[in-house]
Image (cartoon, grey):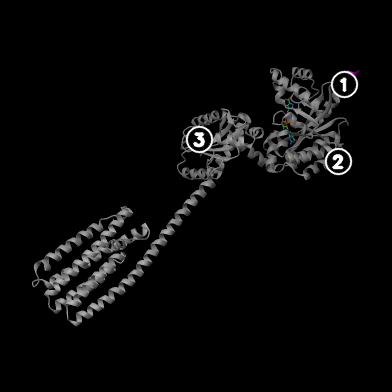
Amino acid sequence: MLKRVAALLFDFGGSQELRRARYKAMARQIPLMNFLIVSNILTLAYTHFGFVPKFLSVGFPAAVCLFLGYRTIFILRTNVDALDDTAIVQRLKTVVILSFGVTAAMAIWSYALFQYGFPFTQMHVVLFLCLTSIGAINCIMHIRQSSILISTVIVGSTIAFLVSSDVLVFNMIAVNMMVVTTAMLFTNFGYARDFANLVERGRVLREQSKRLKELNAENMRLANADSLTELPNRRRFFTELNALVEERATTDVPFAIGILDLDGFKPVNDVFGHTAGDELLAETADRLRALLPPDIILARLGGDEFGIIVPGFEADKAVSELGDEMCAALRVPFNVREGNARVSATIGFAVFPDAGQTAEMLFERADYALCFAKQHNKGSVVMFSEEHERSIREVSTIIHGLREADLEDELYVMFQPIIDITTGATISFEALGRWDSPTLGSIAPNIFIRSAEQEGIISKVTSILFAKALKAAAEWPEHIRLSFNLSVYDLCSMVSVQRLVSQISKSGIAFSRVTFEITETAIMQDFERANEALTMLRAMGIKIALDDFGTGFSSLSYVRRLPVDRLKIDRSFIAEIEESKAARDVLRTMVVLCKNLDLDCVVEGVETQSQLDIIKDTGGRLVQGYLYSKPVNRRDAKAFLELHRSEETAGAA
Ligand code: C2E
Ligand code: CA
Ligand code: CA
């Protein structure tokens, strides 16, 4: 029975948080409660001083007051947050025990005093019990057990008074007390229940918000990470970059950003399959992570492209050495499931604030440096420099000039003959575009053509140049053909292709006299569409030449699938032909290939007699180059034809 009572008394159910909250709420009330009890004890002792024994009027009150004072200080000095749940339960038990002990002591003390007094002082005793208990119950309402104990003790002592006193007033006051304490217990229980609910709801809410925060963090992680390599992704890269730009905006402390691009990754994907490609990318990330100091941010921007942020920039040299180390680490062959794969890496760096003051600008500059490296020295590191800045500025002046230009007036074509070396006869002229700007001077075609493409005015440029070329060709003998260079944008839409066709129709020149030259890199940009357009042009009798052959990616077998009639072997092969046997072998192979595929083959860029001799030796037939003629104007082209005709006739004679 005792055990069961103890279990009931010391069961502080609910959650840990609820117990803690109860203890805290109670601890806050304790000083007030003890003050109330002490002052009530002192006044009661005072009214009884002199006619009750000293231990009742001084000894007992002093002991209780000292004890309560000590408890108050003890509780005030406790840091509840530092207590664990077992400590709190222990404290609660102590509170329950003490509330019983103190109330019982006071009840006994009151009873003792009551015996000595006369009606007024007895009245004070009853009032003391009444007020003290009501005050205490109120203060300690968060600990239900204590409230019950206090009430029980008080009710018990009231019964004792009932029994010991025959004064009706006291009996009635006792009844009042019983009613009031019972009512108070009920309201306090109600209040305690609300309190518990509130705490519980708060706990659930906090838990939910914690879970929500965790979920959010996980979402953020997923949204900002690349799943294959577990590196930060493009979005995160730009977040970091923007933050750094903002941070450094006021101080101008430099930092570098880099873009790393793998060379030869696509063939790995094609040959070994996508799984191997993925493995290679993951391994790339691992190697770079192992190499880079922790303050450097490495991200996967997509595909085989990685971004690097170097917050602590010291000198160009240090960054480019770091880049070299990265390139070296990636040159080591990769063990993929199907075998050994080799790639290399090219990196472009740009440094804040010299290369750019915004994230976009910096990224563009790094990308420019990367493209520059890819064109000039694959597998190397390039820092964006003032020289690059200048050439970018040039391009933008050209774009601006092109927009302002009177194109009809300023564009014209030059002609370079293509010669059949077996007969020495000119078989055709290649038209080469020229732009003489009154403000910028004469601009090379590969530059203004690219700008016109960027500006979206290439179709206008093409049609002006083509019209002028056709006009010149109309003056030539029937058997002299015209070659004209096209940009990939000229093949982009059926409308532009049709415009070319109708220009030929209008000129009165036979379709079969026209050859369009297009580079393989241009075709590769949009193979499907280019293929479709070229097939259509060919069906009308127009010839197609694959220009700059050998500089791009297309393998020999690939050429077979393209709708072309002629290959033009790039100048770069001929430049080395005298010194390099390999170049001679390549040339010979290409010539043989063309024969096998029944394609015409034009060797470009022939400058010397000895080059010509070698070409003759490899079996080449058609050539073009400064040896015969530089590009000349329309009048000189006509003159060239006449001169050669007379040479031919002279030769024949
Ligand atoms: P391409 O089609 O390969 O043209 C041959 C280029 O090599 C021409 O340069 C020509 O002047 C130059 N060349 C010819 N023989 C020799 C030689 O023996 N030695 C050297 N060093 N160079 C030689 P150009 O006229 O500066 O044209 C450059 C490129 O611009 C052309 O390369 C072509 O791709 C493009 N292009 C020229 N005109 C047009 C055009 O009207 N439209 C389009 N879309 N592109 C054009
Ligand atoms: Ca050409
Ligand atoms: Ca060419």
Q: Residues within 10 Å of mark 2 (few under 14, many from 20)?
A: few
Q: How far is mark 1 from mark 3, CA to CA?
A: 70 Å
Name which of mark 1 and mark 2 comes first in the sequence.
Answer: 2
As drawn, 474 above or below 243: above
Residue at point 19% right, 70% down?
Answer: 107
What's the residue type where badge 3 is placed?
A: Arg
Mark 1 and mark 3 residues within 8 Å of each other at the beta carbon: no
The relative height of residue 275 versus residue 67 in the rendered view (above or below) is: above
| Residue 547 figure quarter | top right
Residue 10: x, y in percent? 30, 60
Report helix, strand or loop for mark 2: helix
Q: What is the three-letter code of the residue carrying label 2?
A: Ser
Comparing labels 3 and 2, the label whose residue is closer to the camera:
3
Residue nearer the viewer, 105 or 550: 105
582 and 400: which is toward the camera = 582
Q: Amino acid at mark 1?
A: Glu
Q: Which residue is mark 3?
A: 289
Where is residue 427? Give x, y as percent. 84, 27
Q: How many marks?
A: 3
Q: How far is the residue under mark 3 from the one under mark 2?
A: 62 Å
Which quarter shows the C terminus? top right
The local secondary structure at tag 1 comes to helix
Please state if 477 lies on the left or on the right of 402 as rendered: right
Dot 1 corresponds to which residue? 648
Residue 384 makes an appearance in the image = no
Q: Which residue is mark 2?
A: 505
What's drawn in magenta, residue-wise?
A: 645-653
| Disc 1 + disc 2, Cβ < 8 Å | no
Identify the residue shown where x is 31% and y is 74%: 183
Callout 3 environment at 10 Å: few (<14), some (14 to 19), or many (20+)? some
Mark 3 element type: helix
